[in-house]
Every structure is written in structure tokens, then in C-alpha cells.
Amino acid sequence: MQALYDQIQVYLNMEEEISFKEFSEYYRKVLAELGEVQESLDEEGVWKALFIVENVMSNAEGRAKEGRGSESKKYAKMADRLQLWAKNLAARLGQAGYTEEDISERFNKMLEEGTPATEAK
């Protein structure tokens, strides 16, 4: 999960959009990893997985609205599938006692982790 988390941080800080092919490959890696490790994820892993899923889902939804044709439909399907994972992972955090506000605060911190440091002049 850590490698996927590191990669989403890179994607979130890129100026340009990645191609459909690269997006689709990353999406498949996320689903495969979740399928393998979902039961064994510790709390930190659940946080990272939810962060990844929420960001990929949000991006897929945006791309589905922007585009037309088969790619747009594929993005919409990706977002739908990821929504199930997001609900599952958020429910696990809810069972651990976290609120939506806690999740939002933690996500903001996670986004900051990936922000490149500004150079001192």
C-alpha cells in the first residue's frame, strides 16, 4: 500500500494530467492491492488506502464529466467501483471511532505530506 500511496502523492503534485492508459494501470494496481490486503490492513494502511481510493475516485469522476465516449464511460465505472471501496474503508475508520471531520483533517495532513517543500531563498 505504501508504494501506491507514494505514487498518488506524485500524481497529485504533477502539473499535467496522466494519460488514460497510465490512470487505468494505476487504478488496476489499486484494486489488485486492495483485494489482496484488505483484511490484513492495519489502521495506518486503512488511512492510506482510503486516501488513495478517494483521490482516484474523485479524479475519475472529474474525467468522466469532462470527456465523451468510451473513455468517459470507463472513468465513470472506475469511480463507481471505487465508491464501494471508499464506503468500506470509511466504515472501518468509523468503527475505530473516527468521525467525518477526523477523516477530513487527516486527509488535509496527508495532502500536505506530498506537497513539495518550497525552497528558501
Image (cartoon, rainbow, N blue to C red):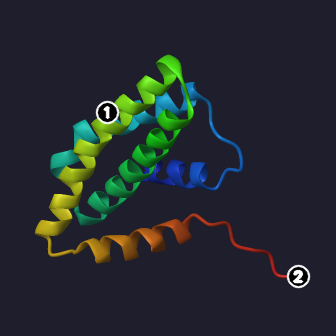
Q: Quadrant of residue 45?
A: bottom left
The first of marks 2 and 1 along the sequence is 1
Q: Is residue 6 left or right of residue 44?
A: right
- In the displayed structure, 103 sits above or below 62; it is below
Percent x, y of residue 121: 88, 82
- Identified at 36% across, 48% down, the residue is 53
Task: Name the residue furthest right.
Answer: 121
Instruction: Determine whether the residue tagged by mark 2 lies in a helix, strand or loop.
Output: loop
- In the displayed structure, 64 sits above or below 121; it is above
- In the displayed structure, 56 sits above or below 19; it is below
- Identified at 52% across, 33% down, the residue is 23
Percent x, y of residue 17: 65, 40
Q: Which residue is mark 2?
A: 121
Q: Does residue 121 appear anywhere in the picture?
A: yes
99 or 114, nearer to the observer: 99
How many numbered marks appear? 2
Disc 2 to disc 1, C-alpha distance: 44 Å
- Which amino acid type is marked by label 1? Ala
- Category of crowding for the residue at label 1, using alpha-carbon neighbours closer than 10 angstroms: few (below 14), some (14–19), many (at least 20): few
Instruction: Determine whether the residue tagged by mark 1 lies in a helix, strand or loop.
Output: helix
- Which amino acid type is marked by label 2? Lys
Q: Does residue 41 appear anywhere in the picture?
A: no
Q: Which residue is mark 1?
A: 32
Task: Name the residue furthest left.
Answer: 95
71 or 17, nearer to the observer: 71
